[in-house]
Image (spheres, rainbow, N blue to C red):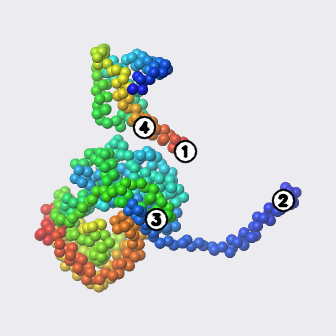
Amino acid sequence: MASKLAKPSLLRTVTQRNYAAQAAAAASQPSSYTLAKHEPKVTTLPSGAVVASLENNSPVSRVGLLFKAGSRYESAKNLGVSHMLRSTVGLATDNMSSFAVIRTIQQGGGSLSAESGREHIVYSLDFNRDNLDAGLEVLSSVGTQPTFKPWEVQDNLQRINTDLALRDPSTITMELLHAAAFRNTGLGNSLFVPPHHLGKISSDMLKNFMASTHLAGRMAVVGLGVDHDALFKYASSLVGAGGEGVAGPAAYGGGELRHETGAAVTLVAVAGASASLGSKESVALAVAQQILGVGPGTKYGSNASSVLANAVASSGGLGAASSININYSDAGLFGYFVMADSASVEKVVRGVHGVVQNLKATDADVKQAKNRVKAAILMASESGAEFLTDMGLQALLTGKFVSPAEAAAAVDAVTPADVDSALQKVMGGKLSMSVVGSTSEVPYVDQL
Amino acid sequence: MAAVTKSVGFMAQLTSSVKRFVFRASGFNQMGLYHDDCLYETSDVKEALRRIPQNTRDDRNFRMQRALHLSLTKSILPKDQWIPFEEDREKGRYLQPYLEEVIMERKEKEEWNKK
């Protein structure tokens, strides 16, 4: 083919390829790229829905669709409907069969999940950024227009039964603590279907619950690794009816609930009314929680820096203790959780209670605890899924987003006096208690 | 079906009378059965039967028990209890909406599996 090489046309194209010029250009380009760093953005739609996003340049996009539709919005008639709702995610919707939902997600290399708490339900989607549109279509279909075909809902009961069977005693203890603390108001409702409603929650009940909770004004759309404008457009396209929907009133009442199982390990949770999400007291209590201790920071560690762990050790009983700090949009619980050998549970509970009651935070304690709170906040933001849920809950419940760095900075302002006064307020009020295990050995709240 | 009885065109009348003839000749109405009681229980039909409401399923089982008993005693229902053509058209296709959905879902699966 040598003769052809000599042809002028080919020679011309060779010169036009400009290999030499391209090599020179490549050399002058930077050898590494720094992607632009973005700040979180929050916008509110006219309907009241909050859209929050952070572009983190990740190849995987995460989008969360949240509604105020947790167990606190249930009534006595439909107790457990929020559990059914989170468990039926992925079943047929008005425009997709259950099979299509699953296959579309699989085909796009994504994952779709639903999680619900006492206040919210979050439908979250992880998807390849390149095919995100296909995933978002499924997400809105699943989150806003499920059909609840009676036979599919019926078949789903097996999953509910598994959920119920997999609850460990500590979950049940926390459920009972909420029921004792908030009595018959919304936050006292269990996250799980009560046994007398098992199999009795019909598709109509699910539809009614959806209609009264999945409204435009009770929605938040959050994204990680997505363009804010695109997410805003997506959120606007999610047509939702207006209106207030059901209110889930919560009032701290206090009380005691005991569940006898005769187990060799007894679990006790004691808590008082505490601060709501985002309040100044909630920060002080977060510090107090770290002073008391939340379990060992090193694997197989003795948890020596935890006040509660020391209290258990000096009580002479066998057990472990950690502190509880839960904040809801308008209420909260703060206290301690004890897990002890049934024979010595009384000693442990009395020891721990005395320590929490009489805690005086020192400067050194507070300084150490502040570092731990900051570390906890920042470490939680390392995981995309956790970050998304956190951003979603903030957007849903407070309408804004405080970035982990800002939240960590807010911790600095806490003083030992703040911690003491917050703690006194909680422990000085009426306490609630729940016990699961061998209840006969556990003192009642008024005996502590 | 109002559309069947009210249509006046020649072809419509012809199809209607052919339908009536076939209905009468098949004779399942004399055993008190509906059209959808006589379907072969393919996997699609079985799935559709699983989805119908309990009372519909109970009615179906009753009609089948009655037909089995008639078959056992080698008799048919008294003529006044035979199911008329119109009733069969109206109520006898109780399984069809469910069956259509099952078939659609199966076709969707087959379509996906081709990819």
Q: Which corner quadrant holds the C terminus of chain A?
A: bottom left
Disc 2 chain ID: A
The answer to whether A309 appears left or right of B35 in the picture is left
Q: Tell me the number on the disc at residue A397.
A: none
Residue density around tag 3, few if under 14, some if 14–19, many if 20 or more, within 10 Å: many
Q: Which amino acid does label 2 sit on?
A: Ser
Percent position (x, y) of residue B103? Answer: 45, 36
Q: Residue at left 41%, top 23%?
A: B6
Residue on which the image places disc 1? B115
**Looking at the picture, does residue A314 appear above or below residue A256?**
below
Disc 1 chain ID: B
Q: Residue at left 72%, top 70%?
A: A23
Residue on which the image places disc 4? B101
Q: What residue type is labelled 4?
A: Glu
Residue on which the image places disc 3? A224
Please tell me if label 1 and label 2 are on a single chain.
no
Please tell me if label 3 and label 2 are on a single chain.
yes
Disc 4 chain ID: B
Disc 3 chain ID: A
The answer to whether B68 appears left or right of A438 in the picture is right
Q: Residue at left 35%, top 60%?
A: A218
Residue on which the image places disc 2? A9
Residue density around tag 1, few if under 14, some if 14–19, many if 20 or more, within 10 Å: few
Mark 4 or mark 1: name the one nearer the start of the chain. Answer: 4
What is the CA distance from the residue labelled 2 to the residue labelled 4? Answer: 64 Å
Q: Is mark 1 on a helix, strand or loop?
A: loop
**Looking at the picture, does residue A359 appear above or below residue A19?**
below
Q: What residue type is labelled 1?
A: Lys
Question: Is A306 or B96 nearer to us in this picture?
Answer: B96
Question: Is A233 or A270 nearer to us in this picture?
Answer: A233
Q: Which amino acid does label 3 sit on?
A: Leu
